[in-house]
Amino acid sequence: MQHRVTTATLMKMKQDGQKITALTAYDYPFAGMLAQAGIEIILVGDSLGMVVQGKENTLPVTMDEMIYHTAMVSRACAFSMVVGDMPFMSYQGSLDTAIENGGRFLKEAGASAVKLEGGTAVCSVITAMAKAGIPVQAHIGLTPQSVHQMGGFKVQRDEERLLKDARDVQAAGAFSVVLEGIPSPISAKITKELQIPTIGIGAGAECDGQLLVLHDMLGINDRFLPKFVKKYADLAGIAKQGLEKYIKEVKDGEFPSKEYEYK
């Protein structure tokens, strides 16, 4: 039986040059599929606001919603590390509030770690949570919770700032860092300099691992896809065919046939 992935597992993978796989999941069935397939990190992202709830951005997602979805995912995972995404305004206030909310992911939802957005500006939060025994994954570059401040979902190219953010979150105690929407040469420099693993999403091939939104890479949602997303399947298309066939058979009186009736 495989042991559950831990922060030590990820650190060793970086040291050994083994790539880390990460995907999002928001419920029990999909999380089970990911865990059985051998995905190392399952991120319960606040992206659920857009992907599952149909909202314009991630900002309206609440702590209670994140706990609800993370608990479902955790119940399906005996192997993958489950990381709960701290939603907007769950950690930007006081350190006590950040620690309390971070602790909920571990106590109530069964997660192994939390993720929060920001670089140098949130280092005090990372340090406080790490000291409280809450493993923290940092997230720099394009940070969706700052969509209004950034003026939209834009690629981040300020190399000096990004390198500083990366160094600072590592020094603050983060066990890994997500690099989002960053040109590949900059991500490569960050990955080479840091001792902790880098997980890229739209950040090139040189990162220690890769992250995608599950519903995007499996073609579940019919929505705009960023340039960095590769569709590995078209589940929406397959589902549409099945639904159309079901409707036709019911309308034509073909379903249910005798084989689907009780005697």
Image (cartoon, rainbow, N blue to C red):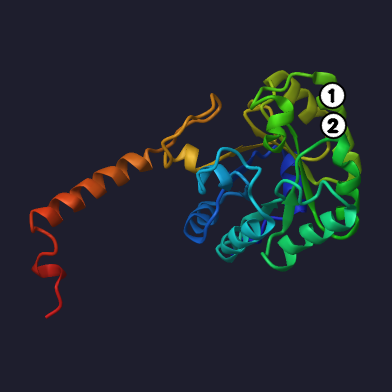
At which x and y percent is residue 249?
13, 54
Tag 1 near tag 2, CB within 8 Å: yes
At which x and y percent is residue 29?
47, 59
Q: Secondary structure at mark 2?
A: helix
Image quadrant where residue 130 sits = bottom right
| Pick the front one: 249 or 38 | 249
Image quadrant where residue 57 sits = top right
At which x and y percent is residue 149?
74, 29
Compared with 80, 163 (above or below) is: above
Q: How many marks?
A: 2
Give the number of the disc on residue 253: none
Residue type at mark 1: give it.
Answer: Arg
Compared with 142, 236 (above or below) is: below
| Pick the front one: 227 or 211 | 227
Residue type at mark 2: give it.
Answer: Asp
Q: Residue at x 79, y 37 (%)?
A: 118
At which x and y percent is residue 253?
8, 58
| Pick the front one: 59 or 7 | 59
Residue 142 visible here:
no
Q: Does residue 101 appear to the left or right of 243 in the view shown? A: right
Q: Which residue is mark 2?
A: 165
Q: Secondary structure at mark 1?
A: helix
Q: Does residue 8 appear to the left or right of 215 in the view shown? A: right
Quarter of the image with the N terminus is bottom right
| Disc 1 packing (10 Å; few <14; some 14–19; many ≥20) | some
Quarter of the image with the C terminus is bottom left
